[in-house]
């Protein structure tokens, strides 16, 4: 197949079995690493042509990965960044530190990938005959980074860690962001079980880095590091003080690193929120320990980091903040960030999430912060039950709160224009797919 348009590449990838869409009846065989090893062997293992940093966790892994990639780029390294999901453009998944790869390279590499599929099939004991969508995206990213002659690549896991398609890497470091209850039907129903799945990205004799964790997760990571003869560096023991505040349109941070670093770093981050200060600190700890910190240039890379759908502020007919928060902790964080920036104004919230998320817990928080709440569809990528969300919202709202159900993102935005003042801020949260649908709808109104 010869691709003429970028949209054809995305359509082709999504035409394969897409396990990102599956939230029930999960078949673990389809994620066996033997599949990905066999596939990458057939492609010549392009992932071994550059150094990698592997990032897993429940929350903050995308931001932490982006901080790492941007800092390495600022240091003069050509750095690939693989993330998922994308918000509005599938090219967001594989970038050069956030910058899109040239169209000609995307097309040429996709041609090579599809050519290889003409003769490649998994054996029966490895599950499906052809790769899944995520396996294809992962292989495509590995090929692109080799084609671009990257010296480093920062790779974010898709789901879990132990059986994730990315876990064939031999990284120079493994990075573990905060663990929460998520994908419990697949990863386990306790923090400890989920931490076990994530911990398996730690490799033998390779340093690992962890964010501030709940005790049960930290114990799992420490045990895995011991078994792998890997040194585990913890943010909680390496940073003695971290202070941040939103001021003058930036998140001002002061990080005090303890021994052996004994250094104070002051930053002005483009991404708002205290949580981003912690994500950045984890990235900085990793870089310092690996000897990849260059004073002055590294800071510039960290400060310039932005990501679609992560507290992304858009100046439209209303000021809109887009965030993919879809767990209780991440919802708590984005609500705190939103209020820190816009004060106690109630504003309006557009909310929607997949049916397997804790919508009750998230809506319990949202009703405390907003007078007006609109339930909307979080894209069509995953199953959602808007009627269940709206019914629960109606049962907990106060007498003076205004609520609405608008299935389409465009209709939700029309409601915003008709029912808010031009100075009212709007928060869109609950799903990256909702953020993407709303963002695309902005151009239609």
Image (cartoon, grey):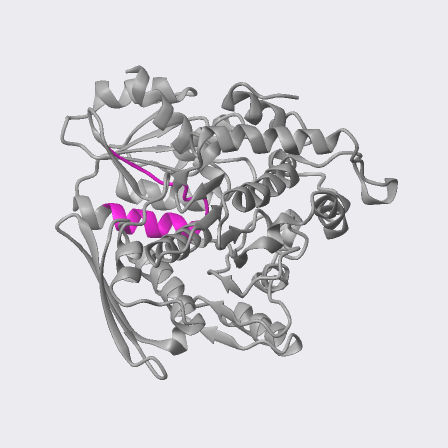
Residue 129 pos. (x, y %):
80, 34
Residue 131 falls within the magenta-colored stretch: no
Left/right placement of residue 252 relative to residue 125 reads left
The span picked out in magenta is: 320-338
Determine whether 302 is above or below 224 in the image.
above
Q: Is residue 320 visible?
A: yes
Picture quadrant of residue 395: top left
Residue at image location 76% in from the left, 28% down from the top: 118
Q: Nearer the viewer, residue 389 or 90?
A: 90
Q: Nearer the viewer, residue 250 or 103?
A: 103
Residue lying farthest top? 444
Determine whether 298 is above or below 393 in the image.
below
Determine whether 142 is above or below 438 in the image.
below
Left/right placement of residue 73 relative to residue 210 reads left
Q: Nearer the viewer, residue 184 or 126?
A: 126
Residue at image location 29% in from the left, 44% down from the top: 368
Picture quadrant of residue 392: top left
Residue 178 pos. (x, y %):
46, 60
Residue 78 pos. (x, y %):
43, 51
């Amino acid at each position: 197949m010869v691709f003429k348009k970028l949209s054809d590449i995305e359509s082709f990838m999504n035409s394969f079995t897409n396990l990102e869409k599956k939230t029930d009846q999960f078949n673990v065989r389809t994620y066996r690493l033997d599949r990905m090893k066999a596939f990458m062997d057939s492609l010549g293992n392009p992932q071994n042509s550059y150094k990698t940093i592997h990032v897993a966790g429940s929350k903050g892994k995308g931001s932490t990965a982006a901080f790492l990639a941007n800092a390495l780029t600022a240091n003069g390294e050509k750095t690939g960044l693989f993330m998922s999901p994308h918000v509005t453009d599938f090219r967001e998944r594989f970038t050069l530190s956030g910058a899109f790869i040239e169209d000609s390279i995307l097309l040429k590499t996709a041609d090579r990938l599809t050519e290889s599929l003409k003769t490649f099939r998994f054996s029966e004991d490895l599950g499906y005959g052809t790769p899944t969508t995520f396996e294809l995206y992962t292989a495509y990213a590995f090929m692109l980074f080799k084609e671009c002659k990257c010296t480093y690549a920062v790779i974010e896991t898709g789901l879990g860690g132990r059986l994730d398609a990315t876990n064939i890497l031999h990284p120079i470091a493994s990075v573990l962001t905060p663990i929460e209850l998520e994908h419990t039907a697949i990863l386990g129903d306790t923090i400890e079980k989920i931490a076990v799945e994530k911990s398996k990205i730690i490799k033998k004799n390779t340093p690992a880095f962890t964010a501030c964790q709940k005790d049960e997760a930290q114990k799992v990571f420490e045990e895995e590091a011991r078994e792998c003869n890997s040194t585990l560096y913890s943010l909680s023991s390496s940073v003695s003080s971290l202070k941040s505040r939103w001021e003058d349109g930036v998140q001002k941070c002061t990080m005090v690193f303890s021994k052996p670093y004994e250094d104070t770093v002051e930053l002005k981050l483009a991404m708002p929120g205290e949580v981003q200060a912690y994500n950045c600190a984890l990235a900085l700890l990793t870089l310092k320990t690996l000897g990849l910190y260059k004073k002055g240039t590294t800071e510039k890379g960290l400060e310039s980091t932005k990501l679609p759908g992560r507290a992304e502020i858009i100046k439209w007919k209303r000021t809109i903040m887009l965030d993919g928060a879809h767990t209780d902790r991440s919802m708590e964080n984005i609500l705190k960030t939103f209020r820190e920036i816009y004060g106690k104004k109630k504003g309006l919230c557009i909310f929607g999430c997949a049916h397997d998320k804790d919508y009750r817990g998230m809506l319990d928080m949202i009703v405390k912060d907003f007078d007006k709440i609109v339930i909307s569809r979080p894209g069509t990528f995953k199953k959602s039950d808007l009627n269940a969300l709206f019914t629960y919202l109606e049962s907990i709202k106060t007498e003076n709160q205004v609520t609405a159900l608008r299935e389409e993102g465009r209709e939700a935005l029309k409601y915003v224009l008709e029912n808010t003042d031009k100075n009212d801020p709007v928060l869109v949260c609950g799903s990256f797919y909702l953020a993407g649908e709303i963002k695309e709808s902005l151009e239609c109104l």
